[in-house]
Image: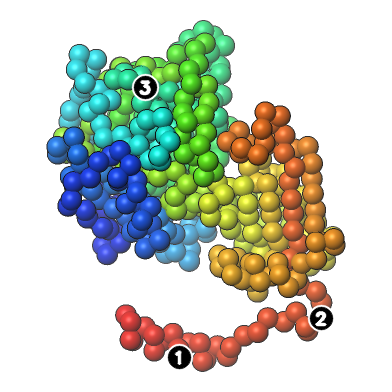
Amino acid sequence: MDLRAFLDALDGALLRVPQELSPEHEMAALLRAVEGRGLTVLFERVAGHPGARVAGNLLVTRRHVAIALNTEERHLEATYLKRKAQAQTTRTLPPEEAPVKEEVLTADGPLLSALPVLTHYERDAGPFITAGTVFAKDPETGRRGFGIHRMMVKGERRLGIFLANPPLAAYYARAEARGEPLEVAVALGVHPAVLVGAVVPENPTGPDKLEVTGALLGAPLELVPAETVDVEVPARAEIIIEGRVLPGHREPEGPMGENTGYYFTNHSPVLEVTAITRRRDFIYPALCPWGADVDVLFALAGGTELLGRLRALVPEVVDLELSPGTPGFSAVIAVRPCSPARVRRLIGLALHLDRRLKVVIVVNDDVDIRNPREVTWALATRFQPDRDTVIVPGLEGYVIDPSVGNTGVTAKLGLDATRGPGPEFDKITMPAAAIAKAEAVVESLLG
């Protein structure tokens, strides 16, 4: 249950790159060049880092996530929701059984320069860790939590860390109010199911996120105590960075090309690194911001969570897709036939339930919501702007949305692209038998 087992399971979807490439721009460029082909990439030679490897596009398609969760793509959402409700207690291993303890780097020697941290976009201020799952404890209750947070390399033992999301943003606020640092550990190169667990919304009254992650893995998450901080970390990670987020201190962090497709700068807390542990022949994980695997992660966790909540409130809801490239700001929802008033209620609920969501399009379930051509067809032929537009002003915006500005306030938009009642809105179709025969012929010719 580690990153290496996942890579082995990918079979034909893994591209091995034997040429030596630089972590400064070159690797990110290749990841973006092949993501449309649905390929995970393993860079076998890293300039400046002999013996290290880098893996990226880990969750570039829904099929990759299905492999990570050991299920079928058509059952992905159902598997996610079912397992999330079956939390698994974690299991602690002795240090000698934890692969991530094979090498221990302390403050006496190189730390962050020993890792091939990628620089992604042209105007990025430097290398950024983008696939780090940051583990910590609530300083008041001891409850464990973790999430994915971007970190800018600012020196050998110093990272700027962007903390905007729960639970770690709340943990840090409580530690800072006490005048204390927040002890953290950053796990790099985890099994991709752990990445999915990192973006599962926090339920403060339910099992902690580590127990939920074990459910997604289908086995208890194996942990080991960190070396210099009071945090347990994934025992089969490739790399662990340990340290403390300092209280009462902020520094410029960025610009970095964010998941919005724009550069974003922030005054962020600082993480002082105290140690790094890693496997001898470690694999560093790459996640290219505004890339396809970001879309897939948002769609599975955020999209499926919202779908479950909306189905409970509006039974006509069939499916939901977060639009690629929008970091959860835009969604398409499919419904069974229902009244315009019902659709408007659904639009209002969706826009209020998810603070990220800014634009929602509602279509009927005869539209393939994962096919942009069909969604734009529904907008072009079933939507009238003066009749079917809903605008909700004065709502909370999301911090990385550049259109929000300094106010923190946004307007939100709903578009009702559901069909009218007459037969003139019947979608053209082909006979099922003809489609089945055509697909069989194509399969025989192309494999």
> Which mark identifies residue 154?
3
SS under mark 2: loop
Tell me the residue that label 1 is attached to.
437
Mark positioned earlier in the residue sequence (2 or 3): 3
Of 326 and 367, nearer the camera is 326
> Which mark identifies residue 422?
2
Q: CA distance from mark 1 to mark 3?
A: 59 Å
Of 88 and 103, nearer the camera is 103
Amino acid type shown at disc 1? Lys
Q: Position of residue 363 (x, y in %)?
A: 69, 66
Mark positioned earlier in the residue sequence (1 or 3): 3
At horizontal 35% and vertical 32% (from top left) the residue drawn is 127
At horizontal 55% and vertical 88% (from top left) the residue drawn is 432
Residue 274 sits in quarter? top left
Q: Taking 354 as reference, is 165 above or below it?
A: above
Q: Position of residue 389 (x, y in %)?
A: 80, 57
Crowdedness of circle 2 by 10 Å Cα count: few (<14), some, many (20+)?
Answer: few
Of 331 and 226, nearer the camera is 331
